[in-house]
Image (cartoon, rainbow, N blue to C red):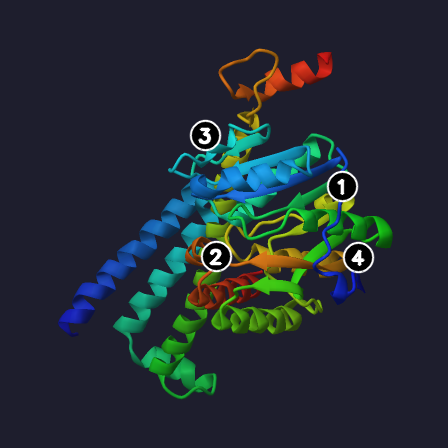
Amino acid sequence: MSLFQLIVVPSAAAAAVYYIVDGLRKRSRLVPGLLWGTIFAAVAVSVGFPHLPNMLAQSLGIGRGADLVLYGTTVSLILVVRWVYWKYRVLEQIQTELVRQLAIERARFGKVIQGDETGGTDRTAVTRLRKTA
Amino acid sequence: MRLIGPGKERDRRDEGRLPDDVWVVVPCFREAPRIGDVLSSLLAIARNVVVVDDGSDDGTAEEALRFPVWVLRHAVNLGQGAALQTGLRFALEQGAAFVATFDGDGQHDPHDLIRLYRALRETGADVALGSRFLGRAVAMPRSRRLVLRAGIWFTRLLSGIRVTDTHNGIRMFTRRGAETVRITMNRMAHASEILDQIAASGLSYTEVPVTVRYTEASLAKGQRTRNAVQIALTLLGDRLAR
């Protein structure tokens, strides 16, 4: 076993156990726990037993195990990018909604109204003035 | 789509004022030197004007407050699309029957708003879109013309909507149109998003010849050629990520 395998296999296996146990303990973390646990377990097995990805790749008609890993990584990356973009858009919408609501609540009317020499007044005051006019 | 106003009548100024149920939304970012002139000319024809200051740090909002207009201020800069949506929502909340959008950099002619309003009344359309290519584009650089033409074809390809000007800031919605359109693209891609939503929701629209005047200030602040690529990528990315 190479130095790389000596470092990666135990680390990945430990991470897999940690995430799976954590997911099983807390129901809210079940799906991400199992997902990450599976990923780390796959890393540990692939690095510890390099012939296994080759066998799997050949059974799928891909050829080399390295190509299988590359294809899997590419597809995963696309999914991750899409997920991150979606999260970004959601956060952007939340931020925009907050700023918008604040702007509307603090709307001011610039005209000097009924002796108000200070210039701008708040929206509530203007609405009140309009209703009484 | 119906076209309003023959080309020969482009230069004729429509007289009169907009009715009180028409609200004009003016998105602004760092327009302190120009907003006074814009509002002076706008108030000559419109009673209800909403200035949305998109987080300017040059006193744009304070300058706007010198006029009898509503001033809404974004705490941070979000982009023109976000400012427009803020103004649209506010105008609708105030009971607007028609809502117009009008850039704050002084490149539009306020009298074109009357043409847009008349177009909506005469055709019964939900949205009236200003078109500088049916009207006039004064002092428009050739590079800008090419980019805008490319934008027209890009929008035609992406949204399937056939318009002659895709990124013109002067337009008018009926209440139904304004309620239907919901701008989520905060920055400059909003113009394409509006067209996209018009096509998708089946809103009727009409194009109206308008005049756009390019000045040094508007060219310095306006969309640069490289922004067009960014807008195209944003729209494509958003479409792919849906």
Disc 4 to disc 1, how far (Cα)?
Answer: 26 Å
Tag 1: residue type? Gly
Q: Looking at the image, is B125 positioned above or below residue B150?
A: above
Q: Which residue is mark 4?
A: B204
Tag 3: residue type? Glu
Q: Indicate the quadrant where residue A44 lies.
A: bottom left
- Which chain is disc 1 placed on? B
Q: Earlier in the sequence, mark 4 or mark 2?
A: 4
Q: Which residue is mark 2?
A: B215
Q: Looking at the image, is B92 positioned above or below residue B209?
A: above
- Which chain is disc 4 placed on? B
Q: Earlier in the sequence, mark 4 or mark 1?
A: 1
Q: Earlier in the sequence, mark 1 or mark 3?
A: 1
10 Å crowding of disc 2: few (<14), some (14-19), many (20+): some
Which numbered disc, 4 or 2, marks the residue closer to the eye? 2
Q: Secondary structure at mark 2?
A: loop
Tag 4: residue type? Ser
In the image, taking residue B42 as reference, residue A25 lies left or right, namely left
Q: Indicate the quadrant where residue A57 lies.
A: bottom left
**Residue that appears at 66% across and 19% down:** A127
Disc 1 to disc 3, how far (Cα)?
Answer: 29 Å
Q: Position of residue B94 (x, y in %)?
A: 69, 30
Q: Foreground residue, B146 or A38?
A: B146
Q: Which residue is mark 3?
A: B62
- Callouts 4 and 2 in the same chain: yes
Q: Looking at the image, is B47 positioned above or below residue A115?
A: below
Q: Foreground residue, A102 or A123?
A: A123
Q: Earlier in the sequence, mark 2 or mark 1?
A: 1
